[in-house]
Amino acid sequence: MKPILAAINWQLEHSEISPADFFEGPSFSALDVLFVDPRPISDRWTYDLPVEKDGARRTYTDSDRGFGRVITKIFHRRRDEASDLLQKAGGLIVCRLHPRGERLEIVSKEGVEEHIDRYSWLPSVSLVDKQHQLNFPSNARFIPRRGSDIVFEDTGTPFEDYLRQFAGRITYSAVYQDILSTPIGRFATVLARNRVGDVIAAQIPYNEGLLVLLPSVERVSPAEEALALIRAATRATLRPGFFSQPDWLPSYPLPSEDSLRDELAGLISRRDKLSEKIEEITEKLRVATRYKRMLYTHGRFSVVPAVTDSLRVLGFEVEESGRDFIVRCDEGDAVVSVAATDSAAVGLPAYRHLLDHVDRARTSGEGPEKGILVVSASCSIDPKRRPTEFTPQVLRGCKSQGFCLITTYALYKIVQRVLAPDKKRGASAKDLSGIRRAIIECDGEFRGVS
């Protein structure tokens, strides 16, 4: 028998998942798996009720034509249904983690009857051990924080695998904290944290049922996400329930337990050392290949550092000068400007910007009178197949002013030649001097060095 799956406010495209409405949809307890994005739930009152002077939104039951009482009944009913789904049917609720949002105060003649927010439908659970007690969601705080710094907990659980599938496309908008600082890891499974240790994904047991709190994923199609969620939900329903181990359990060892624990500890140690080595080599690779970024990037903080690193390889001293930079060497100094674009060619604005910088240096007598314009166009095309990367007007302007016009591909080929493996001791000082002189003395398009 296939499980019954429904999604509320969560755009998932799959034939097995039925879209549902929070306020009028089917009973939660009639489902097996429920996917909920609670963010739009509070729209029901934030769009219709104004903010009062103290910043709160209120509805008054003696004058709101039943609005407050209807909302209260719906949330009570949904809370009971969610409790039945989790605690009686052993079902699964997957809920996106957001801040609690603006709450609604329901006020009667006797005073405030109830506070409702987008998570007020979650059923209560109390988990206790010798030193701690987790009361959820009454003691839960969903603190607004936004980021994409995800640190996985290596639990091997289906929903952590789901998150890992979309690593790099996860953005959290809230973190989970407990008012009493109860360590959630003693009662539930933490799937992921941010870099400072805040919980951003967790699964909380309700007897045989499971509530999973997940951050949002971005740039993922509804069909792809639906497939990944169904796969994780199917695996999760086949796993045994979560139970925290009591303090006395180590007093009951089994014959093979110690050797297996030692083997596991050794594997974890080897894994950690391997992870450190992977990070070390990854960083070395990033440093070694940083010059390539100027072939395909066009953001100021991507292409400019790659160009400056390349010029340093050639022996230039580089110093920043506003949006541009100045290179100095024994062969001469120059103002360098970088222009990169996805368009077919770099146009006059880039040339005029460099001309203005050099003109100010010439008139003040305090800077180089030489200009170098580094260009990169059609960044998505293989450099060998790119058309001319600058307009004829740019070329004529550079020739008339004695500027060097060089493409990032031409500069990359020089760097590649200097760093070639057959030069075990690196390029000679004479070779580097000749390259620098060719660039400094070039008027118009740079066509390489012999």
Image (tube, rainbow, N blue to C red):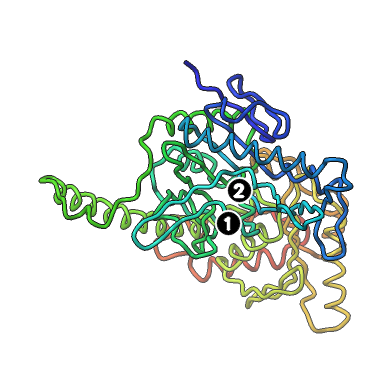
The front one of 1 and 281 is 1
254 w.r.t. 183: above or below: above
Please tell me which residue is depicted at 76% across the width and 49% down the height of the picture.
341
Mark 1–mark 2 Cα distance, whole angstroms, equals: 8 Å
Q: Identify the image quadrant of residue 433.
A: bottom right
Q: Among all residues in the image, which is located at the extreme left? A: 255
Q: Which residue is mark 2?
A: 97
Residue 95 appears in the picture as rendered: yes
Instruction: Left or right? Give the position of 223 relative to 445.
Output: left
Quadrant (top left/top right/bottom left/bottom right) for the C terminus? bottom right
Please tell me which residue is depicted at 23% across the width and 54% down the height of the picture.
265
Give the mark nearer the N terminus: 1 vs 2: 2
Residue 40 image offset from top left, x and y in percent: 73, 42
- Mark 1: which amino acid? Val
343 w.r.t. 394: above or below: above
Numbered mark located on residue 175 in the image: 1
Q: Identify the image quadrant of residue 360.
A: bottom right
The front one of 281 and 73 is 73
Q: Are marks 1 and 2 in contact (CB under 8 Å)?
A: yes
